[in-house]
Image (cartoon, rainbow, N blue to C red):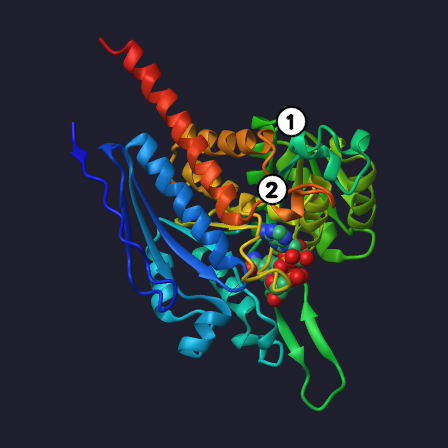
Amino acid sequence: MCWRKRIWRVPRTSGASSELFVLGCGPIVAHIDVVALAGDGIGPEVTEAVTRVLGGVASAYGHELTVRPHDVGWSAYERHGTPLPDTTLEACVRGPAVFLGAVGDPRADGLSPEKRPEAALLQLRRELGCFANLRPAKIDEQLVGISALKPEVAVGTDLVIVRELTGGIYYGTPRGAEAGSDRTVNTLVYTEFEVERIARIAFEMAGRRRGRLTSIDKANVLEVSQLWRAVVDRVAGDYPDVSVGHMFVDRAAMELITAPTQFDVVLTSNLFGDILSDEAGAICGSLGLLASASVGGEVGLYEPVHGSAPDIAGQGIANPIGGIRSAALMLSHSFDLQSEARALEDAVTTVLAGGLRTPDLAGPNDASVNTSAFTDAVVEAVALGGARVGAASAEVSP
Ligand code: NAI
Ligand code: MG
């Protein structure tokens, strides 16, 4: 059995070319190799929390962890003149997994579309071929009281939004201002192929969950949605155990806040999924809680659902849970480390059950802790969980 000494090399927070190696102490079971794109605003704060938590997982389970920071977004534009430098893209394409904090900065508002931080995200998703964005929204028992909904409506919410991520109106051409005209155009386009592959991901997921799929569109108005609906119905024939319903997006926006527990897997397009998942964040209590995994290509892309939150950036108070839960999705999807992913999820639950809250989760009269203290508690909970795992396996060893 291979044992290694634990080595920490701390990355520079700026000029993100240095590498951080954290070698877990114990038998090397897996190599968790992550490209970390901290990005802008609260992105670096959340990414640092995730790096520390992954270090905790590596230590507790004896894995090797490599975190390779690269620039993206406004911070990349400031340093390199582009929001997605070639070095960043090359590292991401090599994979095997990418964590992204957030991009976006008000100073970029005047820039042309291809130089804006958000352009990096769209290009990255397309280059990685991550066409399926999985966004779980499960209300935490301890946080029902801070849901935007009445507790009796919110309790039991447990859904996954499966959002198409590399097509639709965010990518369709022609786009932009028309020369010599007062018109500006965006184009909504989907092919049957694009709809079918995302639909299959959603059906598979529904089959592993409660067997209910709701496909969301605007088929009463949009031809593209009529295609979407027809393809979903055809694919449904291959999944007889999954019950399928269709809902118009305006109705879905209403149903999500009046009866969210009816939803299990929600399948939808790029634009509708973007909007509905922020709504799901409000149901769960804070946008800072929600995680996402973008899969379908060879490299997985994991990001919290929230943006760069310029209003709280630099204060050290960002909620790291969305990032940490994204890291759990990464452990599960990219590294097939299911126990470790569960341990991370459980650690967050343990810390919430212990009463710790970042300011976005605290009531007006409640005490709150900063990002760092919350992260410390999660790392500690992982270590205790890992110790229990170690103890359990020691008991059964001869
Ligand atoms: P946002 O998600 O950054 O913030 C919305 C609200 O939620 C703010 O009040 C913010 O303080 C709060 N919030 C978000 N995450 C939080 C966290 N982890 N902890 C505590 N509070 C949190 O959305 P907004 O304000 O519309 O966009 C800000 C910038 O982020 C824009 O430049 C936008 O383009 C970009 N953006 C980037 C995304 C990404 O990188 N994936 C996604 C969404 C927006
Ligand atoms: Mg969004």
Residue 58: x and y in percent read 33, 37
The C terminus sits in image quarter: top left
Q: In this figure, which residue is indicated by the disc labeled 1?
A: 211
- Is 78 located above or below residue 257 in the figure? below
Residue 159 at x, y percent in the picture? 66, 35
Q: Nearer the viewer, residue 380 or 264?
A: 380
Instruction: State the mark number for residue 199.
Output: 2
For mark 1, does the 10 Å Cα neighbourhood hold few (<14), some (14 to 19), or many (20 or more) residues? some
> Secondary structure under badge 1?
loop
Q: Is residue 367 visible?
A: yes
Q: Quadrant of residue 18?
A: bottom left
| Badge 2 residue CB within 8 Å of ligand 2 | no
What type is the residue that disc 1 sits on?
A: Gly
Q: Residue 126 got which mark?
A: none
Q: How far across and how far down the image is residue 53, in percent?
A: 42, 42
Between the C-alphas of marks 2 and 1, the distance is 14 Å
| Left or right of residue 364, residue 110 in this image | left
Q: Nearer the viewer, residue 230 or 157?
A: 157
Q: Quadrant of the N terminus?
A: top left
Q: Is residue 27 above or below residue 305?
A: above
Residue 45 lies, in percent from the top left, at 49, 55
Q: Earlier in the sequence, mark 2 or mark 1?
A: 2
Out of 351 and 173, give the one closest to the viewer: 351
Local crowd size for mark 2, using a 10 Å CA cut-off: few (<14), some (14–19), many (≥20) = many
The residue depicted at 62 percent of the width and 76 percent of the height is 109
Residue 305 can be seen in this image: no
